[in-house]
């Protein structure tokens, strides 16, 4: 407790040097209030943990609460495989498929009620989204601010429309400032993402205290993990990029210390879709900031490897990763509700290599999202495409589609860190281009809602793409949870055997697993100094190992 108090005091002094004693007292009063509540007993992550990312209404049945239907589906098919469910924003919202939150403490009635969250939590640990960079313009916060309510004075950032914002990092090709009529006249509000997402002003300690109260509510309601959406944008200073500023890092440290005061193993995960060095900076010193960070380079690097049939770039990047501490881990994913980000590989792939990914995305039915540059130009920001389509959309045969796609997913399940699987990947879904055509929202290509009865039927029908993908996931996850080599913090040694094969060793001593994945559509042979049994196929493997196209092996070494 002394350590958390020292961190709280230190961070508050760094963020609010002119009012640190007053803020420190208010934060501790908040902590004392929440200590009267009962918090779940969370545990540390291990090799049994596999997470699924989903919307609360991704799986539906007419007349039933989607959150209840989600539990029915997962219990029926994946209860023994998935340990954690990440619920994307499940609160009342006005736009952006949940990320313009109106009310942070209520469950969207279209999804269910808090009791449905409690029921889901009986069989699965949960990750909640904390969308704490901004709030909907329909929120009580912003309505009060616009009306001149003193309680919400300075809750949002007003700015001079004639100011110089050329250095500000822009994730979207939309105006940075939004004019709004308020009780004080027209004001220009900072809106990083859209004119419906009004950025909070963390320079006002009242904003911090409100958000801390919300985070403690989430931890008390069963959030083993709390995802900080777009946290890198949370603090603004004119003349800077307004991205990853020191105050942001101190705010994350403070939030972690406050959560630990009440729920010691409730973990923060930061979502920062940026180059790798900036991303891992949110680990802090390995003990004082985020418990997990997204591995944003992984999705585009794996995709590029399969497009080229060459894993060289992936191998080089994976070999550069530093080990994590006992208090941190990489959050590995390949697909998500957003697109496949290109910013994280701007320093890893050439312009021509990224352009290849853009072209193939368009050929395979996807779209491209762009971001604005300081000079007024635009560059590709993300690939909006279902990940199975991106990897295997050029294959007509369902068996080849499943084999190629699952080779990519084997990499996800093998890497150092905790794996997270998007619901459409777990279910072997294809993309939904019609959703983009109907809405104009590119990301909806990969956000289709599914009828639970149709889904379950297709998952259980032998030979369907859904059945092939799900059954292979179950096999790999079933193996993984019994292999301590795949503990998120265990040793990872990357091997450079040949360009077509991504290879690494997980674990040490008698528990070692040799991971070999052929990213090409060619027959290849690998020579190594290792022998053992391939747990995937059950075959013995000598020092010369043959691979069919996109074959993957987990070799228990002798």
Image (cartoon, rainbow, N blue to C red):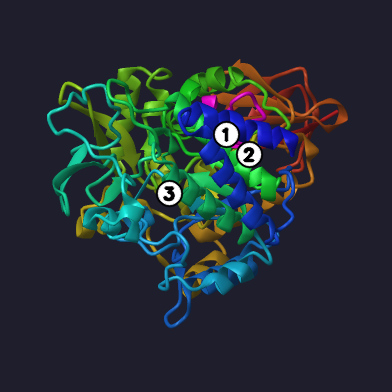
104 to 550, vertically: above or below: below
Crowding near pointer 3: few (<14 within 10 Å), some, many (20+)?
many
Q: What segment is highlighted magenta in the picture?
A: 280-293
Given contact means CB atoms under 8 Å apart, are the residues at marks 2 and 1 in contact? yes
Q: Mark 1 — residue?
A: 253
Tell which of 216 and 287 is nearer to you: 216
> Looking at the image, can residue 286 be seen?
yes
Precedes in sequence: disc 2 or disc 3: 3
Identify the mark at residue 131; answer none if there is no mark. 3
Gap between marks 2 and 1, in whole Å?
6 Å
Q: Quadrant of the N terminus?
A: top right
Q: Is residue 215 left or right of residue 161?
A: right
x and y, in percent, of residue 94 in the image = 30, 61
x and y, in percent, of residue 347 in the image = 40, 17
479 to 321, vertically: above or below: below
x and y, in percent, of residue 346 in the image = 37, 21
**Callout 1: SS:** helix
Q: Is residue 248 left or right of residue 385?
A: right
Q: Nearer the viewer, mark 2 or mark 3?
A: 2
Given contact means CB atoms under 8 Å apart, are the residues at marks 2 and 3 in contact? no
Tell which of 543 and 97 is nearer to you: 97
**Callout 2: SS:** helix
């Amino acid at each position: 407790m002394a350590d958390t108090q020292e961190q709280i005091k230190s961070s508050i002094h760094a963020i609010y040097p002119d009012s640190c004693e007053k803020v420190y007292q208010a934060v501790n009063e908040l902590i004392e209030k929440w200590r009267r509540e009962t918090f779940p007993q969370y545990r540390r992550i291990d090799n049994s943990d596999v997470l699924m990312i989903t919307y609360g209404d991704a799986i539906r049945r007419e007349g039933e609460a989607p959150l209840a239907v989600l539990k029915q589906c997962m219990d029926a098919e994946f209860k023994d495989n998935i340990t954690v469910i990440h619920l994307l924003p499940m609160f009342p919202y006005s736009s952006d498929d949940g990320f313009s939150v109106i009310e942070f403490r209520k469950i969207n009635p279209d999804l269910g009620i808090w009791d449905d969250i409690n029921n889901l939590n009986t069989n699965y640990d949960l990750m909640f989204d904390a969308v704490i960079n901004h709030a909907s313009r329909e929120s009580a916060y912003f309505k009060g601010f616009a009306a001149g309510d003193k309680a919400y004075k300075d809750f949002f950032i007003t700015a001079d429309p004639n100011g110089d914002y050329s250095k500000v990092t822009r994730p979207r090709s939309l105006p940075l400032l939004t004019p709004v009529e308020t009780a004080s006249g027209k004001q220009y509000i900072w809106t990083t993402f859209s004119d419906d997402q009004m950025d909070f002003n963390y320079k006002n300690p009242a904003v911090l205290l409100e958000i801390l109260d919300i985070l403690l509510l989430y931890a008390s309601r069963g959030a083993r993990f709390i995802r900080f959406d777009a946290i890198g944008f949370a603090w603004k200073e004119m003349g800077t990029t307004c991205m990853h500023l020191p105050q942001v890092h101190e705010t994350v440290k403070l939030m972690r210390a406050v959560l630990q005061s009440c729920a010691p193993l409730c973990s923060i995960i930061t979502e920062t879709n940026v180059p790798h060095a900036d991303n891992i900076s949110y680990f802090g010193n390995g003990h004082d900031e985020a418990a997990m960070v997204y591995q944003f380079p992984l999705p585009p690097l794996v995709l590029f490897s399969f497009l080229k049939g060459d894993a060289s770039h992936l191998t080089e990047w994976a070999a550069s990763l530093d080990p994590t501490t006992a208090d941190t881990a990489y959050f590995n994913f390949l697909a998500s509700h957003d697109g496949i980000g290109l910013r994280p590989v701007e320093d890893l792939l050439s312009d021509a290599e990224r352009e290849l990914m853009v072209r193939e995305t368009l050929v395979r039915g996807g779209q491209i999202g762009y971001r604005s540059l300081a000079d007024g130009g635009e560059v590709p920001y993300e690939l909006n495409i279902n990940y199975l389509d991106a990897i295997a959309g050029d294959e007509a045969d369902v068996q080849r589609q499943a084999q190629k796609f699952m080779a990519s997913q084997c990499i996800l399940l093998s890497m150092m860190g905790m794996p997270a699987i998007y619901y459409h990947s777990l279910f072997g879904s294809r993309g939904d281009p019609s959703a983009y055509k109907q809405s104009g929202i590119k990301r909806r290509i990969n956000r289709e809602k599914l009828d639970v009865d149709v889904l379950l039927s297709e998952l259980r029908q032998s030979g369907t793409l859904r059945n092939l993908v799900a059954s292979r996931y179950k096999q790999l996850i079933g193996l993984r949870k019994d292999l301590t080599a795949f503990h998120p913090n265990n040793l990872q040694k990357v091997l450079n055997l040949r360009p077509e094969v991504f290879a690494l060793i997980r674990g040490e001593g008698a528990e070692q697993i040799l991971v070999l994945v052929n990213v090409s559509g060619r027959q290849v042979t690998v020579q190594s100094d290792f022998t053992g049994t391939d747990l995937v196929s059950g075959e013995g493997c000598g020092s010369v190992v043959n691979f069919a196209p996109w074959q993957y092996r987990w070799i228990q070494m002798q």
